Image: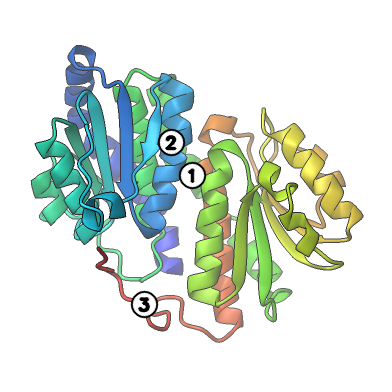
Amino acid sequence: MLEEIRQQPEALERTFSGGLRGVEKLRQLMRKRRPRLVVLVARGTSDNAALFGRYLLEITTGIPVSLAAPSIATLYQARVDYRESLVVAISQSGESTDTNLVLERAREQGATTLGITNERSSTLAGLAEHVFLVRAGKEKSVAATKTYTGQMLMLYLLAWALEGGVRMPELERLPETVESALRLEPEVRALSERYRYMRHAVVVGRGLNYANAFELSLKLMETCYVVAERFSSADFLHGPIALVEPSFPVFAFAPAGVTWPSMDETLAKLQGLQAEIVAITDSGNREVDARATRVIRLPRRVKEILTPIPYIVPAQIFAACLAAQKGLDPDQPRTLHKVTLTL
C-alpha cells in the first residue's frame, strides 16, 4: 500500500498525458450532444471518487449529477429513462458486476456511456462507448490508493470535456503537488504512533473534500479496523457531534476557501468539547492552527478546487502507517479481496 502511494506522481502523469486524445474526442462530441444529466455509478473506493465527481461536475459545469443506486436495476429491475444523459461507470478493476449492469442497461436505454477504469481489457472497457483509462499500473494492495487519485484526475478531465471551469495547465501540475505531499511521510509516520490504540474516530470534510472524508474513513476501517464515521462538517453539527467527548479523535480536511467558515465553526465546537483534532491543510490556511490539536500541512498553497488529490495523500500515508503500528497488513485486510462482486 505504501509503495503504491509513493507511485502516485508518476501514475497521475501517465494518466493525464495518456488520456488527452480521448478527452479531446469526448469534448468535441459533448459540444454536439451536451447531456442534461450526468449519472455516476460505482462501488467502494470508486464510489468515493464518484462522490467527488458529483461536486466537481456540478460546480464547474452546472449540469445536474446523480449518484446511481445499482440495486434499482439489479434487484428491482426498474427501467430508467437515460435519454440525453451521460452515464459514467467508475471501477478500478472494470469487473464490478452491478456497476457494469447499470452501464449496460443505460446504454440500451439511450444514454451516452463512459467507463473509467484501470484495466484496458476489462468488461467495463468493452461495455462503454467511451473509455478513460487510468494508467496507474497494477494495483496489488487490496486498499486502493493510486487508482482513487487516478479516477479523480479523470473526473477533472471529464469536467474539462464538458467545458467546465477547470484549467489544463493546473491539472498538469497536480503530479508535482502530490510529490510535495509525499514529503510529509516522515511527519505522518511519527504522528501515527500516537494513535496506535485508536478504536473509534470521526472524519469530516465539506464540498469537494467531502469525498475524502469518506475515503479516509474507508481506509481506517479496512486497513486499521478502526470504526471511523464520516460526515459533512455541516451534517455533523445536526446530531452526531453528541458522540464526541474529551480526547475523541477527529480528522478534518480543512482547505482555505469557501468551505473554511463552515469547517471553522465545526472545529471551534469540537475544540470546546476538547476533541483531539488532526487537520489536513496547506500553507494557504494558517487559521486552522488556532483550532487543531495537530496539523498536517502541505508545504505549498493549493487552490481549493485542486485540493482533493493532494490532500488525500497524507491521509493514505497515515492509514498505511497506522496499520503497521497496529501490527496489521494493509495489503491483505481480513475477509477482503481486490475485486468484490455484488448484485
Tag shown at residue 54? 2
Q: On the image, numbered disc 1 is attached to which residue?
A: 309
Q: On the image, numbered disc 3 is attached to which residue?
A: 336
**Above or below 257: residue 296:** below
At x 18% / y 55%, what residue is drawn? Answer: 119
Marked residue nearer the N-terminal end (2 or 1): 2
Considering every residue shown, the one lying at the far bottom of the view is 327
Quadrant where the N terminus sits is bottom left
Marked residue nearer the N-terminal end (1 or 3): 1
At x 35% / y 46%, what residue is drawn? Answer: 151
Q: Is 256 on the left or on the right of 55, as rendered?
A: right
Where does the image place residue 121, in percent across and percent down from the top left?
10, 55
Residue 57 visible in the shown view: yes
At x 38% / y 36%, what residue is drawn? Answer: 66
Considering every residue shown, the one lying at the far right of the view is 272
The figure's colour scheme reads rainbow
Q: For marks 1 and 3, give the one nearer the viewer.
A: 3
**Above or below 188: residue 321:** below
| Amino acid at the residue labelled 1 | Ile
Instruction: Kindly report the distance in space between the C-alpha atoms of the residues bearing marks 1 and 3.
Output: 25 Å
Residue 9 visible in the shown view: no
Task: Give the camera-side residue of 224 and 39.
Answer: 39
Considering every residue shown, the one lying at the far top of the view is 32
Task: Give the camera-side residue of 247 and 150.
Answer: 247
Where does the image place residue 31, in percent across and percent down from the top left?
23, 13
Quadrant where the C terminus sits is bottom left
Instruction: Kindly report the distance in space between the C-alpha atoms of the residues bearing marks 3 and 2.
Output: 27 Å
Where does the image place residue 168, in percent across and percent down from the top left?
38, 24
Residues marked 3 and 2 touching at CB (< 8 Å): no
Instruction: Kindly report the distance in space between the C-alpha atoms of the residues bearing marks 2 and 1.
Output: 15 Å
